[in-house]
Image (spheres, rainbow, N blue to C red):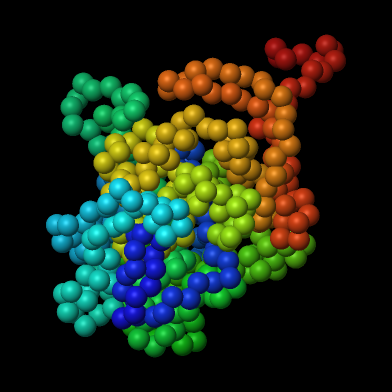
């Protein structure tokens, strides 16, 4: 093992390979508050990549109901148990903007737990049995509730559930890549996408075992494993629709609830994905304590119990929800870019418009401006433009509204 820096954990951690970050990292922000669990994203992926023989049980993209749902069944609870040493604590007194923005996590990662247990594996894990992959929508809309006569209200609903949308996280320190003894899994330098080399894979299923998110899946027909490929031909601009420009993946582009924005995590503070994750800290990683530095980031649901959310997304939850509930002018403009185009946005700029509304909400003043937000492509050319507020059109009176 070597020591690498994991900024989610705010510390160095053990990993089999040296730290080597891609030029820019495939990443996305999912606004859980907007998801309707329509599973359109799920079918967008299914109908493109996993519709064939031997893939019947595979759902690279899935949307599950928390707290009880999960695909494969109970994947999160089973993996969390493997790293539980009774001292899985976050320390948030001292933070560093770059190195430890959420504080420092002092529990064991999947890699460290394996080293401590001396199990002669790179990471702790388990291979789900065939029956655990059944029922991909297990626990749909099942709420947590203790009393029969309770009512739900903010800040924390007493009867609650929410949806979590999952795909491969294209982790910075992937458990799957570490696990493969044949080095058949690699992380691309140009965009951080993690792929299983289908020619080299021998179906050892070490990746299935040691990915804490359970995203590599074994294909009985080919006798090798497969996983989400981040629709890399689209990312490379090979779909004619965007005329050579990098295009968002199928699952992102299909999102009905406008919850998803995909792009790259880079050093540009005006990149909307980078801004939401690193600068505004509105979007947080899923189970950072696993230690893989996942790259799908979530805006946590404002109604769910904070203790549950903190164990899921780390200690940044409270600040993120507070910011989301009464969004700043810039935040609202950036959120307005979600699902306005399939072309990947590399930078945003805002043209200021008039104030259209103001009120006091959740104890704070909120002002709404009808700003225009513009998305620029890789070459700096404008690829999308939208306004924060819907325009109103008044037609000739010969057209009726009440018909
Ligand atoms: S989510 Fe799993 S399969 Fe995807 S890169 Fe991370 S460890 Fe590998
Ligand atoms: S398409 Fe969007 S809104 Fe529908 S389930 Fe997927 S993430 Fe949620």
Q: Using the rendered view, name the quadrant where residue 176 is placed.
A: bottom left
The x, y position of residue 261, in whole percent, is 57, 50
Q: Is residue 311 above or below residue 126?
A: above
Q: Going by the image, does 309 lie left or right of 369?
A: left
Q: Please state, as top left, top right, bottom left or bottom right, where the C terminus lies in the image.
A: top right
Q: Going by the image, does 129 lie left or right of 4?
A: left
Who is closer to the viewer here, 167 or 386?
386
The x, y position of residue 185, in whole percent, is 45, 79
Q: Is residue 327 visible?
A: yes
Disc tally is 0
Q: Please state, as top left, top right, bottom left or bottom right, where the N terminus lies in the image.
A: bottom left
Who is closer to the viewer here, 168 or 154?
154
Q: Is residue 210 visible?
A: no
Q: Residue drawn at (31%, 29%), measured in percent from left and top? A: 157
Q: Is residue 58 above or below residue 400?
A: below
Q: Going by the image, does 184 lie left or right of 313?
A: right
Q: Using the rendered view, name the quadrant where residue 135 is placed.
A: bottom left
The x, y position of residue 272, in whole percent, is 60, 49
The x, y position of residue 387, in whole percent, is 70, 34
Q: Residue drawn at (66%, 32%), measured in percent from left and top? A: 388
Q: Residue drawn at (26%, 29%), measured in percent from left and top? A: 158
Q: Residue drawn at (52%, 48%), measured in percent from left and top? A: 279
């Amino acid at each position: 093992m070597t020591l690498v820096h994991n900024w989610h954990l705010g510390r160095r951690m053990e990993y089999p390979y040296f730290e080597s970050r891609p030029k820019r990292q495939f990443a996305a922000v999912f606004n859980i508050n907007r998801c309707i669990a329509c599973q359109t994203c799920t079918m967008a992926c299914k109908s493109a990549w996993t519709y064939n023989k031997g893939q019947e049980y595979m759902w690279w993209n899935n949307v599950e109901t928390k707290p009880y749902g999960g695909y494969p069944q109970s994947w999160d609870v089973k993996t969390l148990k493997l790293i539980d040493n009774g001292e899985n604590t976050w320390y948030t007194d001292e933070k560093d903007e770059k190195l430890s923005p959420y504080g420092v996590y002092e529990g064991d990662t999947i890699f460290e737990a394996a080293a401590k247990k001396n199990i002669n594996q790179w990471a702790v894990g388990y291979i789900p049995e065939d029956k655990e992959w059944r029922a991909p929508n297990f626990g749909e809309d099942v709420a947590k509730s203790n009393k029969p006569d309770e009512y739900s209200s903010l800040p924390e609903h007493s009867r609650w559930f929410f949806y979590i949308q999952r795909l491969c996280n294209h982790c910075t320190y992937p458990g799957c890549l570490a696990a493969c003894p044949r080095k058949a899994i690699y992380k691309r330098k140009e965009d951080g996408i993690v792929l299983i080399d289908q020619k080299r894979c021998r179906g050892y299923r070490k990746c299935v075992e040691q990915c804490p998110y359970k995203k590599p899946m074994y294909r009985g027909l080919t006798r090798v494993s497969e996983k989400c490929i981040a629709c890399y031909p689209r990312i490379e601009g090979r779909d004619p629709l965007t005329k050579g420009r990098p295009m968002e993946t199928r699952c992102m582009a299909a999102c009905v609830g406008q919850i998803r924005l995909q792009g790259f995590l880079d050093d540009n503070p005006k990149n909307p994905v980078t801004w939401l994750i690193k600068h505004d800290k509105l979007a947080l990683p899923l189970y950072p304590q696993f230690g893989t530095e996942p790259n799908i980031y979530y805006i946590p649901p404002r109604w769910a119990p904070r203790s549950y959310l903190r164990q899921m997304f780390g200690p940044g939850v409270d600040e993120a929800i507070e910011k989301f509930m009464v969004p700043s002018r810039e935040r609202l403009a950036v959120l307005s870019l979600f699902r306005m185009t399939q072309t990947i946005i590399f930078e945003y700029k805002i043209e200021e418009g008039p104030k259209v509304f103001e009120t006091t909400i959740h104890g704070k003043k909120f002002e709404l401006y009808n700003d225009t937000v513009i998305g620029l492509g890789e070459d700096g050319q404008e690829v999308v433009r939208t306004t924060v507020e819907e325009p109103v059109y008044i037609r000739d009176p010969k057209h009726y509204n009440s018909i």
